[in-house]
């Protein structure tokens, strides 16, 4: 019996050796997301292969599948991934804690906004090259505002007044995500502008007065002037309503702008849509600006030199300009002042980006390992506020409970107070 | 005669209402697959619209769904075939020798959440260099197909009188021969049920294929996600892909419907 087992063992290990030897030195495996920039990379890879002689095996996956696949491969220590696209705020903390990102000590990060680099670095060292940024904006219907004799709201009081005036039986005054966890990123800018935040020095801070006031305001706005059923709506649901002309104003991430002004996807003439800076709150105006996607080298990669070569090319200024031409809002600062790009890009996008890059907050969610659980908890708070139109007298108590739970999560992962 | 007319009418009215409710999502999917993005999101929903084949063009030309079709078919067919090869004798043995413990043990594999197999499998298959191979996918899908085959067939075999094979054995046949020549030819309906059901389960499987396959062996349920991009959903593409995926399963079920329904209730009426 023992003899047999050892035979199998030999057979198995020789199989592994074969598999190892089969991989050629000039070949890397790259995982990209189903994202316009991932598509752009896929289209440009043949040129990269021709120039460098490196063969690139590329796979593209939907974002949650990508996370699941990377997690499975890395956790079982049997991954063959060399380079991958990653979401710094969603999975960055967890991946870096497990040591799955390779450090990028020699990369030149001088072209990236400082606040964004915070989320791409862990322990002061960079691990992710930011690719794409997005920031909170206000989308609105020019024609409806004009008809109502309103100017574009610049602060929360004006926003509420405009939402009230524009709200009618057929058109909702304002929309923003109301579906629990999905809403958390969009509520963040409201909280910042009230002077609050989700976490402060590794401790839950969303039960503070400014944060609760912001959640109340959000609930009042959406509960009174939002579309019906807003508490089950994320961007997938709001977007079609906005495109069908059922919503007058919409606060969400800048990433949707390209689709809104695409006439082949919209019933309303696109000239009626416009984009503006997120309105200021009572305290400040610091909407989120985050790096939604970055790119990293896998720490277990056995071909780090080739992988780095690919990463350098994939995050180069040249590729970033190509991205900008395709309406992708890239993270590099220099491409935003490039004259050719500026002449092609929508001025509204350039202006709101400049404002957010200067004043914005570089995080849009509770930035911790257990992001998902924390978002669910805070999401319940948001829903309670919307359901009661911001008047709930349980909100303070509820916020306290949820904050305690988030603190527990932080303690479990050893991030509490850090 | 007149008395019977009203209840019959009511009966069919009820059937119609229920059918409409059940079929509505399907109808929505079918019509949406022929609509443009603007028509899909328009409110109120458009009943009459100019149909477009653009979504199907995306599915079969831009996305290469034929390859995914082939992958799903190969994986499903071989997994079901192998499951029949192993499962039919196993089911026969369970039925004739009352090996209930063994049967329960096989069922356990089905009751355990599939996700608990994934990590070990991934490690084993990647050490063997079998990730992104048909072998890994087929073996994993056999975990779905084999218990179905064994359970449906063991109850089916129990309905066949033992006297038939006993008389064959009296005439000098071995048990194996009796199984091959007497029992199997009588088991057509059962085998069809088991095949159809296990093939559909394999066809629809998402979790195993997602982790164990890559670009080369990607199956259909995974490929639908190609239409979901970051911050953008191509509803028309999703709907067309869904129609394309459902079509073979629906056709298969329609052809073998009679057996499938019979097979599903087989365990319930023993006699």
Image (spheres, rainbow, N blue to C red):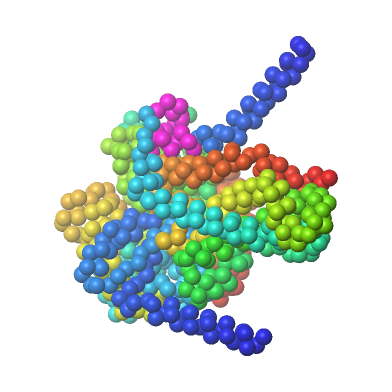
Residue placed furthest toward the front: B171
**Picture quadrant where residue A399 is located:** bottom right
Q: Nearer the viewer, residue A335 or A139?
A: A335
* A84 horizontally vs A272: left or right: right
**Picture quadrant where residue A128 is located:** bottom left
Work out whether A234 lies above or below B172.
Answer: above
Residue placed furthest toward the top: B2
Residue A335, position in %: x, y? Answer: 22, 61
Work out whether B56 lies above or below A411.
Answer: above
Tell me, yes or no, if residue A207 can be seen here: no
Work out whether B233 lies above or below B34.
Answer: below
Magenta segment: does it hold A195? no
Residue A30, position in %: x, y? Answer: 37, 68
Magenta segment: does it hold B31? yes
Residue placed furthest toward the bottom: A3
Q: Nearer the viewer, residue A341 or B132?
A: B132
Residue A54, position in %: x, y? Answer: 28, 72
Q: How many marks?
A: 0
* A266 horizontally vs B82: left or right: left
Q: Residue at x 78, y 46 (%)?
A: B268
Bounds of the magenta span?
B29-49
* B187 horizontally vs B78: left or right: right
Residue A289, position in %: x, y? Answer: 37, 59
Position of the N terminus of chain A, as image quadrant, is bottom right
* A244 horizontally vs A224: left or right: left
Tell me, yes or no, if residue A266 can be seen here: yes
Q: Residue at x 38, y 31 (%)?
A: B51
Q: Nearer the viewer, residue B108 or A282?
A: B108
Q: Residue at x 41, y 35 (%)?
A: B34
Residue placed furthest toward the left: A339
Q: Residue at x 43, y 77 (%)?
A: A19
């Amino acid at each position: 019996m023992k003899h047999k087992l050892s035979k199998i063992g030999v057979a198995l290990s020789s199989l592994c050796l074969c598999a190892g030897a089969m991989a050629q030195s000039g070949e890397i495996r790259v995982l990209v997301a189903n994202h316009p920039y991932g598509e752009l990379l896929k289209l440009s890879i043949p040129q990269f292969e021709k120039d460098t002689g490196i063969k690139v095996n590329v796979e593209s996956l939907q974002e949650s599948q990508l996370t699941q696949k990377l997690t499975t491969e890395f956790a079982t220590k049997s991954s063959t991934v060399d380079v991958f696209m990653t979401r710094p705020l969603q999975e960055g903390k967890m991946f870096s804690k497990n040591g799955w990102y390779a450090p990028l000590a020699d990369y030149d990060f001088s072209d990236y906004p400082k606040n964004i680099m915070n989320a791409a670095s862990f322990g002061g060292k960079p691990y992710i090259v930011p690719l794409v940024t997005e920031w909170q904006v206000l989308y609105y219907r020019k024609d409806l505002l004009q008809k109502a004799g309103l100017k574009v709201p610049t602060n929360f009081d004006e926003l509420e007044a405009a939402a009230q005036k524009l709200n009618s039986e057929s058109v909702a005054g304002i929309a923003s995500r109301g579906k629990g966890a999905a809403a958390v990123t969009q509520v963040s800018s409201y909280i910042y502008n009230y002077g609050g935040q989700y976490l402060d020095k590794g401790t839950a801070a969303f039960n503070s007065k400014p944060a609760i006031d912001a959640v109340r305001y959000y609930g009042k706005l959406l509960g009174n002037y939002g579309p019906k059923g807003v508490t089950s709506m994320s961007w997938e649901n709001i977007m079609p309503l906005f495109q069908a002309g059922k919503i007058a104003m919409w606060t969400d991430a800048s990433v949707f702008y390209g689709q809104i002004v695409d006439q082949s996807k919209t019933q309303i003439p696109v000239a009626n849509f416009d984009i503006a800076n997120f309105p200021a709150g009572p305290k400040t105006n610091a909407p989120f600006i985050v790096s939604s996607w970055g790119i990293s080298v896998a720490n277990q990669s056995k071909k780090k030199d080739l992988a780095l070569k690919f990463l350098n090319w994939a995050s180069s200024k040249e590729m970033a300009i190509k991205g900008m031409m395709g309406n992708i809002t890239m993270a590099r600062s220099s491409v935003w002042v490039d004259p050719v790009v500026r002449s092609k890009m929508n001025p509204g996008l350039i202006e709101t980006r400049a404002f957010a890059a200067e004043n914005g907050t570089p995080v849009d969610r509770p930035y911790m390992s257990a992001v998902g659980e924390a978002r669910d908890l805070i999401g319940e708070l948001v829903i309670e506020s919307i359901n009661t139109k911001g008047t709930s007298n349980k909100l303070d108590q509820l916020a306290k409970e949820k904050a305690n739970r988030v603190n527990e999560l932080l303690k479990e992962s050893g991030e509490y107070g850090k | 005669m007149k008395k019977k007319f009203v209840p019959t009418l009511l009966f069919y009215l009820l059937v119609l209402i229920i059918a409409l409710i059940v079929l509505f999502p399907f109808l929505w999917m079918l019509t949406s697959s022929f609509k443009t993005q603007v028509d899909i999101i328009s409110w109120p929903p458009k009943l009459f619209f100019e149909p477009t084949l653009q979504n199907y063009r995306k599915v079969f030309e831009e996305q290469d769904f034929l390859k995914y079709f082939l992958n799903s078919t190969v994986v499903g067919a071989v997994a079901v075939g192998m499951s029949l090869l192993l499962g039919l004798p196993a089911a026969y043995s369970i039925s004739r020798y009352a090996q209930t413990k063994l049967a329960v043990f096989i069922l356990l594999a089905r009751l355990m959440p599939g996700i608990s197999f994934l990590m070990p499998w991934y490690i084993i298959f990647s050490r063997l260099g079998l990730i992104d191979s048909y072998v890994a996918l087929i073996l994993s899908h056999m975990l779905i197909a084999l218990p179905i085959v064994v359970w449906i067939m063991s109850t089916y075999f129990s309905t066949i009188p033992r006297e038939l094979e006993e008389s064959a054995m009296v005439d000098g046949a071995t048990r194996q021969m009796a199984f091959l020549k007497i029992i199997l030819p009588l088991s057509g309906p059962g085998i069809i049920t088991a095949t159809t059901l296990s093939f559909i389960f394999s066809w629809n499987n998402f979790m195993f294929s997602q982790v164990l396959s890559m670009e080369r062996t990607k199956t259909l349920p995974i490929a639908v996600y190609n239409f979901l991009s970051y911050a953008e959903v191509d509803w028309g593409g999703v709907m067309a892909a869904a129609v394309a995926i459902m079509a073979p399963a629906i056709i298969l079920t329609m052809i073998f419907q009679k057996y499938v329904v019979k097979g599903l209730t087989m365990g319930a009426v023993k006699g």
